[in-house]
Image (tube, rainbow, N blue to C red):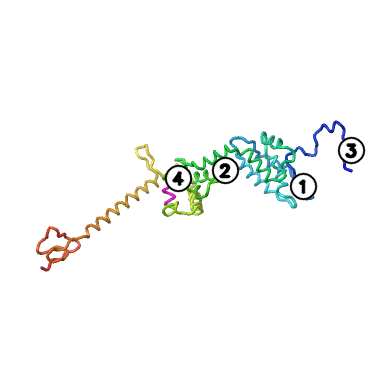
Amino acid sequence: MTDEQQQPRSLREYGMPDANGVLSSIVRPNVVATHFKLKPQFIQFISQDSYAGLANENPADHLSRFLEKCDTMKLTNVSSDAIRLRLFPFSLRDDTREWLNDEGANKYTTWDSLAKAFLLKFFSQKKTSKLRNDISTFRQNEDESLHDAWKRFKRLQRQCPHHGLLDWLLIQTFYNGMTQEFRIYVDAASGGSIMAKTPDTATTLLDEMASNDNYPHSDRGSIKKGGKYDIDILTLLASTVQALTHKVDQLGASLSSSAKVASCEKCGVHGTCSKGLSVRHKWDVNRASKCPL
């Protein structure tokens, strides 16, 4: 006979909720460890970073931080689900805690089912659409360094891990969102155009360049023109290189043209003819030979 059959309940007790925790929406897995106990210090550690569902909070970030903390606790014969399901309520407060309590008794038996329900509730389609749009329309600020822009772009992806954008499209979006100055900068570092690189190679390059560009944009050397326009050194350098290239091309064309010298109509020798110059005869300054005729 069970304890309940041995000790019949009174009418008053039938009108009271069960004190064995059946009202919880979480079914806590059994633990076979002989000395398993969640220390108050660890529970406080979880509660310090609680989630309230505010507009400036990100549920995906909350789950990531919660799992990082739970992974610091490893006990023999205690599953990860047993730890996570017991601690997760302590990571919620206010309306989010009420949501969990209202989910119904014994609804969640695994961590995966609980995490999925949490994201479905607090990561709305509206929030997803906004974050995905923030990624797709990314633009680097005029006073933002490459380091800060790349970090902000990656943070947007982390906040919306289900954005669904392919790697090649992410790189292209970031490149198109950079200022003209930094597009020149990145292309020069890639040896021509970063668009010629694979997504993995381009990502590695941007990671390295961003780590070396960890300083405010205002710290860059600049030249003031008329007290109104700021000309960045990189942009000025690119313009100078283009101007020099144009002059070299012009010089090459001029030398090529001067090398085409007509020969003497009488002797066929290039240079100054002792018999006189014809209308089509040109003097090649590099040669001073006389016509033998």
The amino acid type of the residue labelled 2 equals Cys
Residue 38 rendering spot, x and y as whole percentages: 74, 44
Q: Which of marks 1 and 4 is nearer the N terminus?
A: 1
Q: Which residue lies furthest to the bottom in this view?
A: 292
Q: Is 75 part of what is drawn in magenta?
A: no
Helix, strand or loop at disc 3?
Answer: loop
Residue 59 shown left or right of residue 225 in the figure:
right
Residue 259 rendering spot, x and y as whole percentages: 22, 60
Spatial CA distance of label 2 from label 1 is 34 Å
Helix, strand or loop at disc 4?
Answer: helix
Image quadrant containing the C terminus? bottom left
Q: Which of marks 2 and 1 is nearer the N terminus?
A: 1
Residue 18 rendering spot, x and y as whole percentages: 80, 36
Helix, strand or loop at disc 2?
Answer: loop
Q: Are marks 1 and 4 in contact (CB under 8 Å)?
A: no
**Residue matched to label 1:** 30
The amino acid type of the residue labelled 1 equals Asn
Label 1 crowd bin: few (<14), some (14–19), many (20+), radius 10 Å: few
Residue 178 shown left or right of residue 115 in the figure:
left
**Residue matched to label 3:** 7
Spatial CA distance of label 2 from label 3 is 54 Å
Spatial CA distance of label 1 from label 4 is 54 Å
